Image: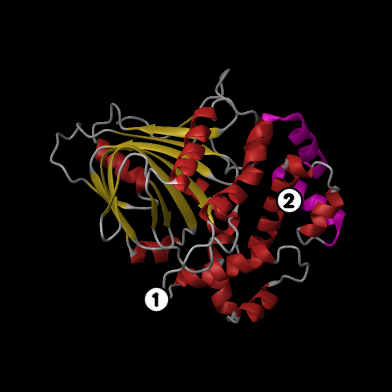
Amino acid sequence: MAPGPQPLSHAAGQGEVAGFRFSTADNDAPFAAWRSVLATLFEATQTQQIPPTGFKADLLVQHFGTFLLCRSFAGSGRFLRDHRRVCSDDFDHVVVSSVLSGGIAVGGKARRLRPGDVTVVDLSSPMRFAMVAADALHLIVPRAGLPSAVASLSPMPCRVFHGDTAMAIFLRGILESLSNASRYFSALEVNALGACFPDLLGWCLGTVPVVSSVKTRGDLGRRLRRHIEENIDRADLTASRLAREIGVSRSQLYRQFEASGGVDTYIRGRRLRRSLQALADPRRADTRIADISYEMGFSDEAHFSRLFRQTFGQSPRDIRAAARAGDSSLNGLKFPPGPVPSFSDWLLMLGTG
């Protein structure tokens, strides 16, 4: 059995984008290994009778702080994200995919995507797709990172931009440019891209229609997370006030954030994580640290600094200095600890970390 996902090295010329690579090469059960990697999001089924070692797949995942860029190649297969999985994992991300080669059919009506086409799907909705020897780029961004006019609380319908349309050309060019330049980006450039890219993507997607659907457990989670993100500056954003403003019971509220250690822990984590992003954002290099702490809902700068150091092991001032110097060690604070990245952990960290 071949090893699992392997972190990318940052040798000379390899840039400062954190990432990992997975390949079925030399794996004695390649499709099973591929299915295991994708199990975070999809149930995978092989569609062609080929020798056990005949299936090939590769996945490259790169983390830009506020979004993931993935490049995948895989032989034939069907992939399902059903209602049960949507309700159980509560992933709340939007995926923009550009087909480079091969064939992909997406959606219940099996819309066929050709090389050059771009599709936008919402992980909060059930979906199915099939592929044959498909090479594609995928950009994954959390719903909370996009403007509410683009990613409202209701699921977005699947959208397809055909390859000869202006938006397909533009989005495809963005994804391909990111992929081609990723090995050359400095730490400072990675921070800058992470800070501004969700706004650019929001402009590209524009206001989209919503789809009517039966309400699920995820609907409440999205409402709560959106409310927290939009009111993060309020020092009075507490569990009791959140329950009252959203109109849910305390027990409902606590169940939603049980996996995150509780409501207050989640809110504090989001405040600290967004403070880290603001301190590393070159566009905010002249903003006072005290002002950033107040913007993130902390009423006392000294208390903020203590919590920040406890969480990240460095002071806000140290982070600001590292960002200005383009220190690559800053990237290590943005991701879960551990020598080998986890696709599931990275997805969760995008929306909640």
Using the image, tell me which numbered label, if any, was put on residue 275: 2
Q: Quadrant of the N terminus?
A: top left
Count of marks placed on residues: 2
Q: Is residue 246 visible?
A: yes
Q: Is residue 172 magenta?
A: no
- Residue 110, given in percent of the width and then of the height, sits at 25, 56
**Residue type at tag 2:** Ser
Give the magenta-colored segment's residue range: 299-328
Query: Which is nearer the N-term, disc 2 or disc 1?
Result: 1
At horizontal 48% and vertical 69% (from top left) the residue drawn is 154
At horizontal 84% and vertical 54% (from top left) the residue drawn is 291
In the picture, measured across the screen, residue 125 lies left or right of residue 252, that is left
Magenta stretch, main secondary structure, is helix
Using the image, tell me which numbered label, if any, was put on residue 194: none
In this picture, is 326 found above or below 110? above
At horizontal 37% and vertical 37% (from top left) the residue drawn is 72
- Residue 4, given in percent of the width and then of the height, sits at 38, 34
At horizontal 75% and vertical 43% (from top left) the residue drawn is 283
Q: Which residue is mark 1?
A: 214
- Dot 1 falls on a residue whose secondary structure is loop
**Residue type at tag 1:** Val
